[in-house]
Image: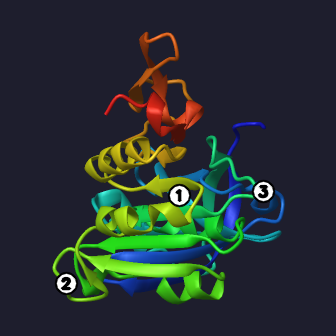
Amino acid sequence: MKYDSQLFELIKNEEIAKGIFDWTVKNSNLSSAAKAGQFAHIAVPGKTLRRPISICDADNNTMRLVFQVKGEGTQIMSRQKVGTYVGIIAPLGNGFKIEKDKRYCLIGGGIGVPPMLYTAKQTDNPLVITGFRSKDLVILQEDFINAGAELVLTTDDGTAGVHGFVTDVLKEKINEVDEICACGPIPMLRAISQIAKEFDKPCQVSLEERMGCGVGACLVCACKVRRTNGEEEYLHVCKNGPVFNAEEVVF
């Protein structure tokens, strides 16, 4: 595809949890091309660098983008008015490889939860495990249920759902699934990949990294991977990922 920016109309901007915003943007040319696990690179007024946001959901006309305010750029995004036209490069990156005859365990931690919704819609009866620090940050639970998922909520402090981590639930239910897909903080992904290896389950992980260009031209989002011959090299999360086979990633 061409890496040129197109305008998307912002038709929804809602705060759905503390500091977490839910956008719906409209562009019939590009929305229909989105695949599970890809991302959008969003122009921010007054900022040189775009902000990469995972695609939460998509249809023929719209994309849903859920993001957390973490700095000045995302703060500006959170204040954008409905009706504004936003410059977006999308869809970018390589997403999850989904096979219809498998049952998947989809795991999201924190702001790594949103891309698992569109992924859940591509699978049959997925097991979805979502993890948050506390109930104030819990999002998208009803959306996953409506998508036909078996859903388990965990919180670090026990204020909602299971008191514990996503890995606790994964260990209990791993024999109920054929493959694992996960997105979230690196320590979580590292632990999930270790469990997957222990139980001999294929595992795909979506890496969260700071990005500059979003198309592989800079080195900001380089990550170390290990090839089948044992040699290590650096690849771009934006262009070669963000989804990798877990056994490839050198955490």
Residue annotated with mark 3: 30
Tell me: residue 211, above or below residue 159.
above
For image coordinates 44% across by 71% down, the residue present is 129
Q: Amino acid at mark 2?
A: Gly
**Residue 159 figure quarter:** bottom left
The disc labelled 1 sits on which kind of residue? Ser
Q: Residue at x 77, y 59 (%)?
A: 100
Q: Residues within 10 Å of mark 3 (few under 14, many from 20)?
A: many
| Residue contact between numbered discs 1 and 3, judged by CB atoms under 8 Å | no
48 relative to 56, above or below: above
Q: Secondary structure at mark 3?
A: loop
In the rendered image, residue 240, in percent from the top left (x then y), is placed at: 57, 31
- The residue shown at (39%, 28%) is 223
Residue 215 in sight from this viewpoint: no
C-alpha gap between disc 2 and disc 3: 40 Å
Question: Which residue is label 1 attached to?
Answer: 54
Q: Secondary structure at mark 1?
A: strand
- On residue 158, the disc is 2
Could you tell which of marks 2 and 1 lies nearer the N-terminus? 1
Name the residue type under label 3. Leu
